[in-house]
Image (cartoon, grey):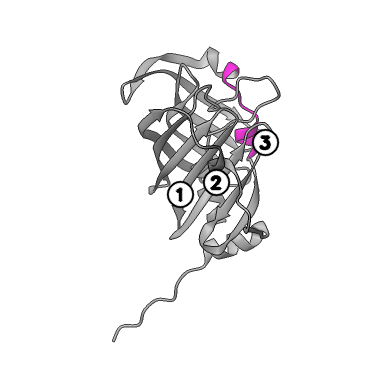
């Protein structure tokens, strides 16, 4: 469960893989790299994000384990690679991410703003996905559809306690990204999703006082 929360928090509203030809939230029309700072229920995850239209990569450290998230927007799926274990696992995109496109947000624009010097439109989000999960808050999108910032909370179906999420991009640099950043390299072995959850939820034994 902790792993699912971390994944959902890190990816929340990053890519909304909506129906074909829709204006996909976060699928910027320009390539870029940036430092991405995500806070999930008070815990901070900082890493790099690399984007090229149709694909996105996030490097993050979760529970001391380096992970690489690679998202294929066109196919609405992704993988998590664990380089230190030479392994990877397929991950589904949560419905909250898979059903929202920018055109649905236009009526909820609340004004223009600047985020780290870049012009952005600020939108209010209040959406319930088909699985019952609900997202509400504010997001900031650039003219090129870069998700620059978000503040909100996610309530999962059958869970009363919301997950508080915030995200911002720092050190944003526009420019082409190497294609191999978005590939699963040879030599990595596929493992079940459950194995990754088990690994993430493991805790080192406490040291005894001498």
Residue found 53% across the figure and 61% down from its top: 200
Check if residue 99 falls in the magenta segment.
yes
Residue found 52% across the figure and 49% down from its top: 68
Query: Badge 2: how crowded within 10 Å, few (<14), some, or many (20+)?
Result: many
* Label 3 vs 1, first from the N-terminus: 1
Reading the image, the residue beneath label 1 is 60
Q: Viewed as shown, does residue 52 lie left or right of 164?
A: right
- Disc 2, disc 1: CB below 8 Å? yes
Check if residue 144 falls in the magenta segment.
no
Task: Work out how far the residue at label 2 is from the one at label 3, CA to CA, in angstroms.
Answer: 13 Å
Q: Where is residue 125? Give x, y as percent.
A: 52, 25
Depth check: give the residue in front, 117 or 125.
117
Task: Work out how far the residue at label 3 is from the one at label 1, CA to CA, in angstroms.
Answer: 20 Å
Q: Where the N terminus falls, by quadrant?
A: bottom right
* Label 2 vs 3, first from the N-terminus: 2
* Label 2 vs 1, first from the N-terminus: 1
Determine the main secondary structure of the stretch shown in magenta.
helix
Q: Secondary structure at mark 2?
A: strand
* Residue situated furthest left in the rendering: 210
Q: Where is residue 98? Give x, y as percent.
A: 64, 33
Reading the image, the residue beneath label 3 is 76
Tell me, yes or no, if residue 63 can be seen here: no
Residue found 49% across the figure and 43% down from its top: 58
- Disc 3, disc 1: CB below 8 Å? no
Task: Work out how far the residue at label 2 is from the one at label 1, CA to CA, in angstroms.
Answer: 8 Å
Q: Which quadrant of the view contains residue 142?
A: top left
Tell me, yes or no, if residue 81 can be seen here: yes
Q: Where is residue 197? Give x, y as percent.
A: 59, 60
Magenta-colored span: 94-103
Q: Which mark is residue 69?
A: 2
């Amino acid at each position: 469960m902790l792993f699912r929360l971390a994944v959902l928090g890190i990816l929340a509203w990053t890519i909304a893989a909506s129906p074909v030809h829709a204006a996909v939230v976060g699928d910027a029309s320009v390539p870029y790299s940036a430092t991405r700072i995500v806070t999930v229920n008070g815990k901070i995850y900082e890493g790099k994000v690399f984007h090229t239209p149709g694909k996105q990569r996030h490097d993050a450290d979760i529970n001391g384990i380096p992970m690489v998230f690679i998202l294929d927007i066109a196919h609405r799926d992704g993988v998590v690679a664990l380089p230190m274990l030479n392994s990877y696992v397929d991950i589904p995109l949560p419905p909250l991410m898979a059903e929202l496109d920018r055109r649905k947000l236009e009526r909820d624009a609340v004004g223009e703003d600047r985020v780290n010097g870049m012009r952005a439109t600020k939108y209010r989000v209040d959406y319930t996905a088909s699985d019952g999960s609900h997202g509400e808050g504010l997001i900031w999108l650039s003219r090129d559809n870069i998700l620059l910032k978000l503040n909100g909370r996610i309530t999962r179906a059958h869970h009363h306690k919301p997950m508080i999420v915030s995200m911002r991009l720092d050190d944003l640099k526009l420019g082409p990204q190497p294609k191999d950043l978005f590939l699963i390299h040879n030599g990595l072995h596929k493992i079940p999703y459950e194995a990754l959850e088990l690994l993430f939820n493991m805790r080192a034994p406490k040291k005894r006082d001498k």
